[in-house]
Each structure stands twice: as C-alpha cells, then as structure tokens.
Amino acid sequence: MAAKEFDIPKLPTYIEIPELNPGVMDGDGPFKSVEEFQKPLGFPGEKIDNWQEVAIAKMGELKSKYRSVQVFLDSCVKCGACTDKCHYFLGSSDPKNMPVARQDLFRSVYRRHFTFAGKYFPKLVGAKELDDNMLDDWYNYFHQCSQCRRCSVFCPYGIDTAEISMAAREILDTVGVGQKYCNQILGKALTVGNNLGLPEPALRDTLLDLEEEVEEDFGAPVKYPLDQKGAEILLITPSADFFAEPHIDGLIGYGKVFYQDGVSWTMSSYASEGANFGMFIGSYDIMRKAALRIRKAALDLEVSRVMVGECGHAWRVAYSFWNTLSGVGAGAQSSDEYAMKLQKQLDDRYPQPQHIIEYTYDLIQRGKLEFDKSENDDRTVTFHDSCNVARATNMGGVEGGQFILPREVIKAVCNNYVDMERSTIKESTFCCGGGGGLLTDDLMEIRVKGAMPRMQALKEVEKNEGVNTLAAICAICKSQFSKVLPKFDFDPYMIVSVHQLVSAAIILDKPQTDAEEPAIEAEETAETE
Amino acid sequence: MSTISIIFTALFYISLFIFIVGMGRKIYQFSITPAPLKIPTAPTPLTQTGVVFRMIREVTLFESLFRSNKWIWLFGFLFHFGLLLVLVRHLRYFIPGDLPEIFLLMQPFKYAAFAMVIGLGGLLVRRIFIPRIRYISAPSDYLMLLMLIIIGVSGVIMTFTENHTDVMMVKAFASGLVTFDWANLPTETHFLVHLFLVFVLLAIFPISKLLHVPGVFFSPTRNQVDDARKKRHISPWALKQEKEHAVKLDQTLGKDE
C-alpha cells in the first residue's frame, strides 16, 4: 500500500483527457481504522457479520435524510459531462475515478435495492449487489475522492459526487470499515480539541515561543493570546497553523494584522481546531459534535465575533454549516432559544463567522493597514483557489467574493501577481489532490496523481510568467503542496499562506486606538482587570 | 371499435396512470426529503431571485452543460428543444374540433423533428464511440436513446414522406382519449410503433433516469440560496435532535454542553 511504487505523471503542455486504464488504481485503499479509533466515534471496531443488511438499511436511512442523496441517485442520465472533470481521473486514468463512475459504485447498489427497474431487471439498468468486491471498491474509490465538488459545477443537474462519497463513507463506518487517518484524528479533535492532539500546556508554550520569536524578528510585541475571556474575537484556525511550515507564517501574519488593528482577540485551547473531519466521513452527528466545541468556546470566552483562519474545509463548515449545526451565525428566529443564546452575544455588525481574509480585506479597504509591497518583490505570486472555499462558500457578501477578496489582499501586499489558466481557477479550480481525508502517506500515489492538473497549470505560469510563489488559504493545500511540489520539480517552499505575504509586507507601529468603535473599546478595558 | 383501437386506448390510460401516480409519488418523495445542510455549488446566487434566474438558465439553456462539454450540449439541446416544439405541435391532435388560429403559426414546428433526431443521433454516436461514455453506459442507456430515435424517425416518416397516416383519424382518436369519446385509430405499423413507444416512455418515466426532469428542480446544489450566515437553516430531523440534545456521541466521548 504505502510502499507501492508508482510513476509520477509527466506534466503535459496542456491537460489531455487520458485513455481509460481500468483497474490502474485498484487496491486496498488507505489503512483501515481499528477498534481503538472506531469505538469512541460510535462505530463498530471491525467489519460486522451482517454488514450487508446494515449497509442497505443505512443507505435507506441516508436517502431519506438527505435530499441531495435521493435526488442525485435518481437524476443522473449518464451524459458524460463530468467524465473529464475529476483531477484524480485526469491524473490516474482509472475510469472508476470519473465522477459518474464513482457515483455508480453507489448508485448501482441503490438501484438493486430501492428501484423497480433494479429489482426486476438488474442487468438492464446496471444494478449490482453490495458484495465483498463492491464494498472493497467503495472503500478504495470513495477514498480517491477529495469531495472537491468540481464535478458538481459541470453537471447539468448539479449532482455532487462529494455528497455520494460522504454517504458511502458513512455507510462504511457504520459497518465497521472506517478509515484510520480520519477517525484517529477525529478522536483527538473531539477529546483534546485539535487534530494534532496538542494539549493546552503544549499549545500555550508554542504560542509563547511564537510571541518571543515574532518580537525578536519584527520588533513589535505581537501577542498570540489563548483562552482570554472577554476578548472581542475568537479565532478558530487549523491546528497546523500552530507549528508546521508554511502554515505558522500565516498565523504570524494574522497576529500582526490583529495587532495593527488594535483589536483584542484570542484562540481557545478547548476549540483549537478549524478543520472539521466530521464532514469528510459524512457524519452529521460527528461534524456537529466537533462544531459544538466552537460554540462552547465562544460562549465561555464571551467573545462577540468568531473568525476563521486559513483553512478550506474549516471555512466550508464554518460558512455553510455552523449556523445550522451550532448556531454560530445570524438570523435565527427569536423562538429559536438554542441559536439565540449565542447570536445575542455575537456582534451583528460583522458577518458571523468571518474569514480572516474578509477581516484583513476590510482593514485594507478602510486604509487601516500600511504595507511595504517591495518586501515581496522577490516573488511572482499566483493564487490556488482551494476547492471548498471556491465552490462551497462566499466572502464579503458579494457574488464571487471568495475569488475576489483573497486576490485583492495579495495584490495589496505584492507587486507581482498573475492568475493561472482560467479553466483551472475560481469555480473550476483543481483540488490540490489531498483534500477530503486523503492527506495521509498511505494515499500518496493518488495524491501525487491527483495533483497533476494543478501542477500542470502551475508549470505553465512558471514558464510563461516566472511565477515562483503559490499562495493558498487552506492547511490541507499547503501540506499537500509541500509534499508534491518537489515530485514535479518545483521548490517545495514556493507554497505560502496568503497571510505570510501579508506578514512580510505589513508595516507595524503601535496599535491604533479605534475611535469608531467606542463600545467595544469600553468592553476591552473592562476585561483587562 | 377495432380490437387494436381498444388495446391502444387501454394502454394510453394505463401508461398515463402509471406516469401520473409514479411521478406524483416521486415528486412527493423529493419534496419531503429534507436538505439538512446548505450545499449550493459556485457560482452561487446570494438571493432567491438569483436562484430563480439560475434555475431558468439551467433548464432552458442548460448552462452548466454548456460550460462542461460543447458537443453534449449541442446534441442535448437540439434534442430537448426539438422535442419541446414537436410536443407543442402535437397538441393539435388532442384538442377536439377546430383549432385556434395560433396553431397555424406552429406549423413550422414540424421541422423540429429533425433537430430532435439529429440530437439523439449525436448522443447515441457519442455513447457508442467515446470510451469514457461507453464505460458508464448500461443497456438501458442505449435503449432509451433508441426508443426516442424510433419515435422521432417514425414521426418524421409520417410527416415528411408519402407514408402519411390519416391525420383526421389520429385527431379523432387522440381527442377522443381526452373527451372519453373513444374512436378507432389508424393501423399503419409505423404509427402504431410510434404510439406504443410513447406509451412505454410515459410508463417508465417515474422509474428511470428520466427522473432528471423533476430532479433538477430539487437539486440542492442548484436551488439553494447562498445565505447560510444570514439565516439559520435547519432540517426537521436535525432540529429534533438538537431539541432532545441528542448528540449520539455523548455516551462515548463525554458531554459538551
């Protein structure tokens, strides 16, 4: 599995649709989870005896709980529009990585058990039994989908393979066939508070060290506060930001922006994780459980704003799901006590939750930040739209804001910016290849192959425009690119956080007092007692 | 009435009944199934009006398909648009007595049959010759196209060749179905085949991929407004869970609130 040898795809001059190579990505899939990681999440420790029965029952339950699943299973006409849209297919040429073929692993079983045609004429409509082989295929190929939703953009009915892939993974977990990577991490996130399993003292030390380092390097007492009750902003960021390169340079950048704005902010040791892996395994309950930690932290710390750092899947869950899952948002009905409890506390002058890019962008617009753009003159930057940000969220409340704001922030701090080929960015962006629970070494082959389309577009701007820096706002993208860039002859250090660029250019002086917001200032003084 | 007319009359009502009941059930199922999370796909409209326009573009112009693949779009559009015009023109057979003048304007719609057949032919050729599409095709996918092609071609034969059928008789039969004033139908083979396959199509509509017709309107990635931060969206089952404070994991991973 992990040690399997494979060829690294050659980068073509333009993306070609490969010839089909059936079975080329066949295999056992990623490492399977074991009882130790399954049990805490409420899943069986190993494949249960009556797994078929349970799986079919679960399928029935899911399609009655999710309109997406029911409608998507019924509506596909096999037109083929999606067949050349998945980066994993383009990179691997395995036909089961074509979105419709991936869905059909699931749909054929649905047809067999839930449709008239599939029950009585299975051969005619391609209905299949859920046998051991099929289950193995599910496990293997639904872990070759990063739930990036690119296929959904191009489907005439909006069929989103991510929804099917999440449903399949939930069924797999229900019968005891879980993925080790995701479920082990979830265990840590739900008990310790972050995916790394970094406990409060370690986190506190890390942040103190960071403060020292930043003061030494930049000469300003920038703080990275933890568990500060009464702060205005609670920052929820991916835990990779706390220690890994290049992520931490982004965290340094957030701190500098907060410092320069003079706002009080804090992180939480209880909710020290932005990335919510509950989404990857398709479990509403587990995703909610993880989201509830943020609700609790916001209530306990009595913050008036919740903000999210650079993390693609975190931002999807935060932007699209938090209001639903945990009431972090706005616009709950007054009778909705659960949501109102928190929403009364949150400041409705700001979007809740807000993305760090929205915050920095707003400060730039209001002229509150000054930059020395020449600090980034050694760079020619391009921006990788992270799939979940690009296709499942918004920023700034304007259509396409999730594409506009990050680029505007980059352009405000860099002189040299170019976009990659239009069909590989914005809503058509290619996934980095490591999203959706695939960022594990045992899936390196599919990660490298899936990165090919993005690498191809990058190679083009490297050649033609001299691009030497790839900026992203997602922890998974950053980690994935650090690993795969060298395999395609790029410098692994060319991947940076957007806030690393901000950090390099920002001019720090004493925090300005914000005369426009006296109410919040007053609160702050009260809190320092 | 001739035996064959009785059989076809019965088949009409049976297939129509299956169509109406089947589609009713399916649409009801789609509508009662909750969409627990906000999952619109970019480029997402931020207002309800925006969503209405998106849906209109999607079902009239096949916007996403156009972005995706120009050939499939071209053939798909030719077929669907052709079919629409042909169907409208067929209304004349179901309206008893003299037709309103507007039907004169619809006369040229008969040429849409060619668009329909060309579109279907293109889709079939692609399904057979493009390995990616061949790979994802089940026998029913070919049969569906063949059936539609036979319907289209038999219609073209009746309209544009010497093998006309007795149109007045067709009208008496078809309008008779509507007014329950049943009449004999012409018995040329191509007409019977045409009619029979249309009945089959009606009957399999609710149990086949033809469900994409209602499906597109219920697709959450296309019909949701992107306003998750502004309005709390919650499904009945999730609300119930929230009220009961039932996070399943409480037993295994400690309580949170």
Image (cartoon, rainbow, N blue to C red):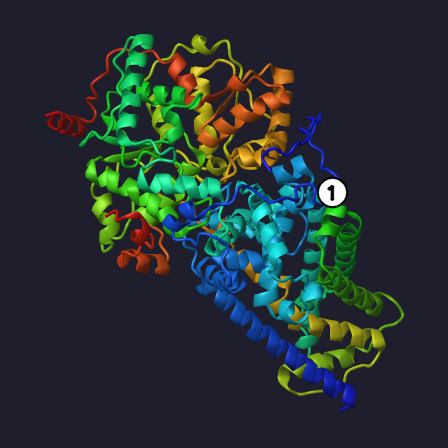
Q: Nearer the viewer, residue A290 or A124?
A: A290
Q: Is residue B100 visible?
A: no
| Residue at mark 1 | A20
Vertical arrangement, residue B158 with respect to residue A438, above or below: below
Disc 1 secondary structure class: loop
Task: Please identify the quadrant where the N terminus of chain B is shown.
Answer: bottom right
Compared to residue B80, the image places residue A499 above or below, namely above
Taking the image as shown, residue A170 lies to the left or right of residue B58, namely left
Q: In the figure, is residue A100 to the left or right of B131?
A: left
Residue A464 shown left or right of residue A196 in the figure: right
A43 vs A269, nearest the viewer: A43
Query: What is the x, y in percent for residue A105?
Result: 61, 54
Q: Nearer the viewer, residue A128 or A124?
A: A128
Name the amino acid type tagged 1: Leu
Q: Is residue B126 visible?
A: yes
In the rendering, at what x and y percent does residue A509 appear? 27, 10
Name the residue located 69 percent from the left edge and 31 percent from the top edge: A15
Which residue does the image show at 30% across and 57% down from the upper left?
Answer: B246
Q: Is residue B224 above or below residue A352?
A: below
Q: Is residue A131 left or right of residue B47?
A: right
Q: Name which quarter of the figure residue B155 lies in.
A: bottom right
Residue A251 placement (x, y as % from top left): 36, 23
| Image coordinates for residue B242, horizontal then vertical, percent | 29, 55
Q: Chain of mark 1?
A: A
What residue lies at 74% left-to-right and 72% top-to-bottom?
B197
